[in-house]
Amino acid sequence: MSIFCKDSSSSKSDKLLKEKKVSLKLAQRIANICIWEWDYSKDRLYFSEEIYQVCEINEDLENISPQAFIDNFICKEYRDMVKDALKEALKFGRIEEIEYKIVKNTKEERWVRTNCEVIYDDDNEPYKVIGTIQDITEWRDREVSIQENLEFLQSVIDTLPNPIFYKDLRGIYRHCNTELIKFLGIEHKDIIDSSVYDIYPKELADIYYRADNELIENGGKQTYEAKFTFNDGSLKDVIFNKAAITDHEGITTGLVGVVIDITERKIGEKRVQRLLKLKEASLEINQAIIGINNISDLFNLILEKALNIIENAELGCVLLLDKDENLQIAACKGYDEKRARDYRLKLRETFFWLVTKGEFHKAVIINDIQDLLRKEFPNILDNNEMIRVQSSISSPIIVGGKLYGLVNVDSSRNNIYDEMDLEMMEYLRNQIAIVISKHKLYEETIYLS
């Protein structure tokens, strides 16, 4: 009875072992994995059946040495890498993973992945190395295809004239095009893996960060205007067009954005608006000639319109030149009117004379006025608004080819005026000269009549 039980147990074990071998073979076939064994003492390789199929080795070719296999079945450019890997395996006990190309008898090249472990004897000497070979050609082809598609898409977005970027859920830049690199004036490596706080000033970064979080939370698309720091340090007006990126389950994984520079458009719109205001002011001044009997009222109206048209102008004055080349205040806004009545200033002591060196042809911007006061002039700019004047536009009034006076508009902010302000003032001063000439003619006509 005991013999029967023993035989039965042995039969079951054999059957179980056979089933495991079949399962292992099937798993190797599904995973496209082949087994190889290197008998280190005999320097011979032994292969599983699958390797003969993958490498198209003749099955009668057995007991091949590792060197012979490398020389005959591995592409030339990878042979040294495989040799070095085997040396490393003997030194450290294993190869984690290497990828290389083999060449079949048909000259077809296939990508394979190999790893192995070393088995040691009782004296801790290597006597056997067991490893696997897996055909990964299709996987590598897909990887190359994906990489080529990514490179193609990158080339496409690099040709677009607007900055484009992609951020992950944490607001970290993962991709961008060359135009964003140009706009920011920094290197690609300084953008990727950075947040808005690493790249932009905090006041702008706060705006971008809040907008990004809102888009990630709510999804969809987002469009808004903001300021953008360009590579020259200038702030420009831009439109951000952003959209949330979702996976196949509709979960947001990041966002993509496009930056559109609208600075020139905004400048154009601003210019049109200011020209309309200038036109209205000119019409109002011209129409006021008939209704105004006192020229001082005309000067006050002119100054009021100048301060309204020139942005950032906070106070100003109209100064008339007398026969002794002294300038007297005929109208002022913001300055002490009582002191203005007694105010006299030599033409050659004005900021305008200092900047133009006596050339009275056009309006000029004068910056750093407080420095000029300390160096060149006494304190002549006291005003009711307690404003420390830092910059000014000073414009000559030319009537009949002679200097008639000056129009000044002042600001507490330094370097605040630009070419558009200067252009507005140039147009306005010409209108002022025409209006004064008309008013003088009108007064002469009234007198003669």
Image (cartoon, grey):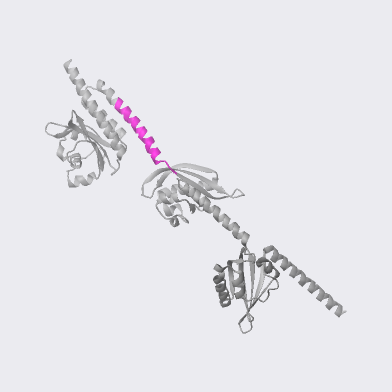
The extreme top residue here reads 449
In the rendering, at what x and y percent does residue 392 appear? 25, 40
* Quadrant of the frame with the C terminus: top left
The furthest residue to the right: 1
Locate residue 431, reporting x and y percent. Answer: 26, 28
Image quarter hosting the N terminus: bottom right
In-image side of 229 versus 394 (left or right):
right
Front one among 227 and 144: 144
* Residue drawn at (12%, 31%) of the image: 323
Inspect this view and state whether residue 339 appears.
yes
Which of 161 and 414 lies nearest the eye of the viewer? 161
Viewed as shown, does residue 271 lie left or right of 217?
left
> Chief secondary structure of the magenta span?
helix
Residue 164 visible to an observer of this rendering: no
Work out whether residue 206 or residue 63 is closer to the camera in this orientation and state it.
63
Q: In the rendered image of this protein, does residue 35 appear above or below residue 324? A: below
The residue that appears at 24% across and 26% down in the rendered structure is 435
Left-right relation of 215 to 56: left
Q: Is residue 46 above or below residue 206?
A: below
The range drawn in magenta is: 260-283
Residue 265, position in %: x, y? 40, 38
Q: Quadrant of residue 88?
A: bottom right
Nearer to me, 74 or 219: 74
In this rendering, is residue 257 above or below 426?
below
Q: Is residue 188 magenta?
A: no
